[in-house]
Amino acid sequence: MNFGTIDLDDETLAFWQDARAFFDRHVTPAVLEDERLHGGGFNEELHLAMGARGWVATQWPASEGGAGLDALRARIVTTEWARSGAPYILASTTLLPPIAIREFGSPEIQAEVLPRVADGTARICLGYTEPDCGSDLAAVRTRAERDGDEWVINGQKMFTTGAQFSQYCFLLARTDPAAPMHKGLTVFLLPLDTAGVEIRPIGTLGGERTNFVYLQDVRIGDRWRLGEVNAGWAVVAAPLSQEHGITADGSDPTIGGPYLAECEKLLAEFVRWAAAQPGPTGGSVLDDPAVAERIGEALVKVEVTRSASGPPARILSSDLLLQTASELIDLVGPTALLAHGAERSAGNGAFEAGFRFAPGTGIYGGSTDVARNVIAERFLGLPRSTPRRNTQ
Amino acid sequence: MSAAFSLRRQDYSLSEEQTALRDSFRAYFEKTIPASRVRASEPGGFDAALWDELQERALVAMALPESVGGDGAGLVELALVVEEAGRRAAPVPLAEVLAAARGLARVDPSSPLLVAMRERGAIVAPAPGSGDRRLAPAGAIAEAVLAPQGASLMLVTGAPAPSQPNLACAPLGWLEVAGGTRVGAADDWAVLEREWHILTAAALIGLGQAALDLGVQYAKDRTAFGTQIGAFQAIAHPLVDAANSVGAARRLLWRAAWFCDHEPESAGALALCALLAAGDAAEQAGATAIHTQGGFGFTLESDVQLYYRRAKGWALIAGDRRTLLRRVAQWAPHALKDALG
């Protein structure tokens, strides 16, 4: 057990100062405003600049285009990136498929794709779910049929966030409709510039843009297949477990980290707002005991959530964000409803934006209910819930 | 994310020695304190014979600093031990006595009471709150209490008060704390209280874990509608939420204890948060386990009720919730310093 301050040598300190300067330089107010307006989850100029430093894949070895950073320096980059408020969604999903590409891709595909992931020129969106699929990936219906040395793909993917900025889609498709549901699937790395691919935007409550990806007679070579035919379940498993935070160790903030950070930002916004409001008995609103007690409750939960890791952290942080975003609007009152730029908007729209952002965090990346199933079965040893057809 | 160039380790792992300590006390308490013994101690909540037996484990000596001849154990280690006692709902005032012994050793290292605590298991406990008459946590069994009075920390000796029946079957008693001997200042009380909060949080985590384990086991054993009831998400997911709460609160408690041991100046509201979180988690685990057991869960035959009642009681005995929450809120700028920039 150790929570002590890490001793940083001069070189590491210099690295850190350089990292902060880098994000200060690239994450301009314009970058942040673009993300607020369009919710793309990505900024190409920043991403390429990170790629030029090997910072897209900080811990990949230099021979593969990464920066070969040790865990401490990688954490410093992550810390400064988060601090800058820059978009990060596509940059983080892009790093998941390479786990499968390394394990299942041919040497040629690895050589073609991985260096471009590392230098930032190739981004990869996740073609997992579909309409009527949700978190049940074994139910995908997008069909891939073999035609000689090629595959012909037809279907529709949904919530393919970042597709509009991506070069590839990590695609789960059905190759044997007769097999049990999770045994008839195959994974492809689909180049998105292939004819027959159409990307259409989906707007979300939180302001993030995500996509439909329509696939009509999309024809790709067999070289883009990852893993054996009908063995796609194993291919998606490795990156999926990472996305769900299952393999993450305690030092890793996991998927819940950004939600907790968002929650802390909202609380900080409230503290700033409240400090400037006169309280009922002198002092500020923060001195109102009724307010203090509710903020106290929120801070206790923040410390609890900070202490969690893995799937529990994913659930706790999402639940906490939902609860806190609602609570803070109640504490502020009607001016918390006012949007960014509205007259006398409390926190300049932060509270209403937080309220809209919160529900999605319990859904994407595998819903909190799926995380609860994982914990019930793997951690508590409870029997599998609900008869699952993919086990048959 | 702080503006300062500073990062902390986030290492929650236990050392081999810590694991061995925990396992040894787990085995000891499992052997020594069957649920029947907890029940037999009700309603007074104190098992004098068990307290005598415990003296052979020399926990007070373990908790005292080496400067007064103790073993100088850290709060992390003591929390591991007290959690195991909590897991058996041990009817002994361990958190109170260990915190009081350390508090007394800081302000009056040559106090004969310290010798009495070590040699014959004399019970000295904190008496929080304000006013002259207080509902003291171990008031019905303590021969002395350490009580904050204005800017002073007072040692008040005298006969124990009559035991008052209560939800938690805790040895509560109304004590007169006016008078006594001034042994320290408000700051000394603050440290004592903080350590007591941490040890109480540990006991609460033990209660919560025990209740959770009973609930999970029942969900595996019991069948209804043709299947193990743990296969129903309506049963499984609340158990998961309780497990998440207990697990995260335990890690928070360890972090709070570590800071008190190593960097008390940076501990902020961590001990308060740990106490409140542990109480919430233990109550949630108890309520969930009772509901999981259904009709059986609310019979007196089920051991879960032992944990559920104490979860609420032990948390409240360590401090009035609304007061503690307001104290947590005072630390908001510290707790949110990274986000505030």
Image (cartoon, rainbow, N blue to C red):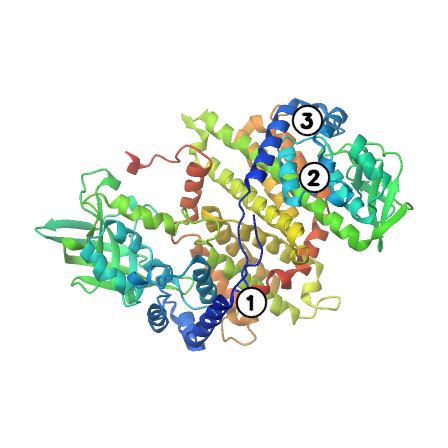
Residue pointed to by mark 2: B314
Picture quarter containing residue A302?
A: bottom right
> Which amino acid lies under the numbered mark 2 shown in the image of this protein?
Trp
Mark earlier in primary sequence (2, 3): 3
- Disc assigned to residue B38: 3
Residue at the spot x=44%, y=33% of the render?
A382
Foreground disc of the pair 3, 1: 3
> Which amino acid lies under the numbered mark 1 shown in the image of this protein?
Ala
Residue at the spot x=29%, y=38% of the render?
A390
Q: Chain of mark 1?
A: A
Residue reaching furthest to the right: B179
- In terms of depth relative to the viewer, which is nearer, B180 or B260? B260
Q: Chain of mark 3?
A: B
Asked whether residue A123 is in view, the answer is no
Mark 3: give few (<14), some (14-19) or many (20+) Cα within 10 Å.
many
Distance between mark 2 and mark 3 Cα atoms: 15 Å
Q: Are marks 1 and 2 in contact (CB under 8 Å)?
A: no
Distance between mark 1 and mark 2 Cα atoms: 38 Å
From the viewer's perspective, is A359 left or right of B203?
left
- Disc assigned to residue A336: 1
Residue at the spot x=42%, y=45% of the render?
A371
User: Residue A184: x and y, percent?
Assistant: 21, 42
